[in-house]
Amino acid sequence: MSMALSLELESGIHEDHLRQAAFDCGAVSPSDDHPNGTLAVFAESGLDLFVHSQDGRHAVRAEGMPYPAAWTVGLRVSLGYLLDRYDLCNRDARQLLDALAKRTSKFFVLSFEYERVYALRDAHGLQYFDDSLSPPVS
């Protein structure tokens, strides 16, 4: 079984930025058995990144953000999780978001079905709102 989280990225972040951030975290190019639009795959967890929309400026769909979004979405991506590797997928998703936040100052939000915000990159930096994605406390 699988599930997907939705990653909405501010206009100005391009596929190449996301792909390189994923590759920096150990992801690889998708094999031929992945559908067109698959950007990268994390081999151990099976987490994959699938581009849904990259055609312009759209309103942020994620609900439950701490304040209304004042930015527009230029790229929408699904993070496909394999449920039997949920913890590994979370690890790779967190590494991806951390790498992306280091590569760009643009905003992004990760949510489940656009209803529950898991992480948000804004003017305050990268914030996690779900314990399963939060970095471990040392």
Image (tube, helix red, strand yellow):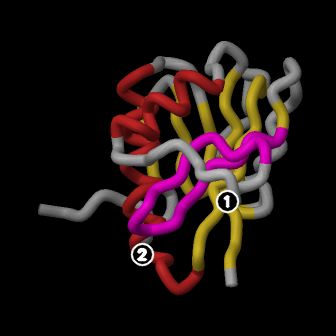
**Nearer to me, 97 or 82:** 82
* Mark 1 residue type: Leu
The residue tagged 2 is: 87
SS for callout 1: strand
The residue tagged 1 is: 5
Between the C-alphas of marks 2 and 1, the distance is 14 Å
Q: Are marks 2 and 1 in contact (CB under 8 Å)?
A: no
Please identify the quadrant where the C terminus is shown.
bottom left
Number of other residues with Cα within 10 Å of mark 1, as a class: few under 14, some 14 to 19, many 20 or more: many
Residue at 47% x, 79% y is: 85
SS for callout 2: helix
Residue 14 quadrant: top right
* N-terminal-most mark, 2 or 1: 1
* Mark 2 residue type: Asp
**Nearer to me, 40 or 105:** 40
Q: Taking 129 as reference, is 31 left or right?
A: right
